Amino acid sequence: MQHPSFTSCYDLVGVGIGPFNMSLAALLSPLTHVNSLFFDQKQRFIWHDGMLLPESQLQVSFLKDLVTLVDPTNPYSFLAFLAKKKRLYQFLNAHFTHIYRAEFSQYLDWVSQALPNLQFGEKVEAIEFVDDTFRVHTDKRRVAGKNIVLGSGIAPHIPAWAAGKTGQNLYHNHEFMHRSQQWHNKRVAVVGGGQSSAEIIQSILADSANLPQTLHWISRRNQFLPMDDSPFVNELFIPSYSQHFYDLPHGLRQRKLKEQKLASDGISMSLLQNIYQRLYKLKLVDGLPLDIRLLPEHEVKQLQQTDTGYTINCHNLSLSHQRNIEVDIVILCTGYQAMVPNYLSQLAPNLIWEGQDFKVNKDYSIVWQGPPGNRIYVQNAAKHSHGIADPNLSLMAWRSAVIINSLLGEQIYDTAQENSVLDWQAIYPLHQPTEELLCDE
Ligand SMILES: Cc1cc2nc3c(=O)[nH]c(=O)nc-3n(C[C@H](O)[C@H](O)[C@H](O)COP(=O)(O)OP(=O)(O)OC[C@H]3O[C@@H](n4cnc5c(N)ncnc54)[C@H](O)[C@@H]3O)c2cc1C
């Protein structure tokens, strides 16, 4: 159906071209009868450019690419990229346990240039629903879509004590590569105990001629803890667990997510070893007079701007002591959070919410008050309902396949999955009084 005031009517219009919507576009590519268009405000693809540190590595297998785990024959796999770039043999000979994130970004950029239905340099400003059609307004045009998919990512989290104070020397880690890397004679604090903080510590310590005067690494966690990448824990990152998790009661799901945090938000073991070894080398082998304080079990409570920099007020969580730290630069590695994008403001009153989150169906469509034939799919906003793997690359291809099957109302991709080695049915029996027994609601 062509709307007179709109240039086209698509089966699916996508907002954002991060890996998740790009995976969807790649798996849609063989389906020539499906008419889709995806927008991104960036001029071209680059993967979290502010955190594309030279040494950063992917935290998952490269086989968890856009398509392979659903359709290894799709032309947009990571292996296809290696073959196209004539580096397959060298890749094998290099014996990577984990590949560089820079290379994965190159792969994604290569796919982004090959797919015809990706439009960069256009920001989606508003979406309305009129006459059984979504009307998507970008800063350059308007298009109509029967269905939409939201893939605009999650937002940096700025803690309350830093709100309104960010600037050149106090910033969230997503801007790291765009800021000065001159640490010499500077007093630096890195706040946070996850992977990003560790990557930044590694980067700050990399050049002996550019070491800071003081370096504080402050984390609420009781240690600088590794990501649990062990085989049984990785069963949380397979489709059958996600499907099982979806059917659990809300309170139990929330509790499980808290318990499982280190399966996704810990630091890669190799990176922890690298930092430890670097500290050993700098202090004990090179004998440099370093002033580096590693402060787990410390929570930042306040931050004040001074004439020369900042005073950070920290709370020692085990002893209830307070401590003030004087610094010039504060890097906030304080995570990311879901947000309701501005472009949704007109649709938001018609969406059904679970607290702050969208209520999401098993097929990743948001429950809403509009016609069931018009769906609003969502990527990277269903951790509360679909499990810990939601923001991660692990289930990206499978989730795209689930969305495509739902969109077309038929089994285009085989999403029936291998069983887990763990007996989730026995651990959390469904259709039984789990709610009363296990749920803390
Ligand atoms: C530094 C970093 C490293 C990570 N490394 C790993 C890893 O190793 N392994 C793993 O499994 N996961 C990793 N993740 C988690 C996850 O895989 C990534 O965050 C992934 O990029 C999420 O993809 P996405 O498509 O949801 O969002 P994003 O990649 O954030 O993309 C969203 C896109 O939407 C666009 N956009 C936003 N608003 C609009 C609008 N109004 N109009 C048009 N476009 C818009 C943005 O420009 C952006 O390009 C990492 C995350 C970060 C932050």
Image (cartoon, rainbow, N blue to C red):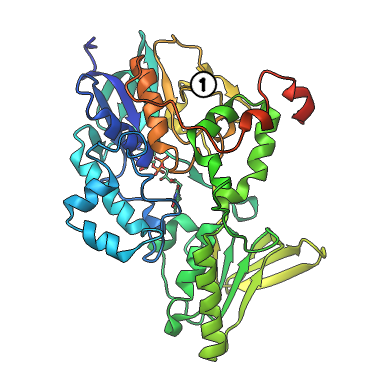
Pick the residue in front: 237 or 103: 237
At 33% across and 40% down in the image, what residue appears? 66
Name the outermost residue toward the bottom. Answer: 287
Above or below, 370 relative to 111:
above
Question: How many numbered discs sit on the rendered protein?
Answer: 1
Amino acid type of the residue that numbered disc 1 sits on in the rendered structure? Asn
Tell me residue 357's x, y (percent): 57, 30
Determine the secondary structure under disc 1. loop
Task: Answer with the quarter of the image where residue 68 lies.
Answer: top left
Tell me residue 233's x, y (percent): 58, 46
- Disc 1 crowd rating (10 Å Cα; few below 14, some 14-19, many 20+) is some
At 68% across and 32% down in the image, what residue appears? 427
Instruction: Kindly identify which residue carries mark 1.
Output: 361
Pick the residue in front: 295 or 400: 400
Above or below, 27 relative to 293:
above
Q: Is residue 244 visible?
A: yes
Above or below, 351 relative to 399:
above
At 50% across and 16% down in the image, what residue appears? 368
Q: Quadrant of ligand 1?
A: top left
Q: Tell whether 44 sits left or right of 157.
A: left
Q: Is residue 123 visible?
A: no
Q: Quadrant of the C terminus?
A: top right
Q: Tell whether 318 sits left or right of 294.
A: right
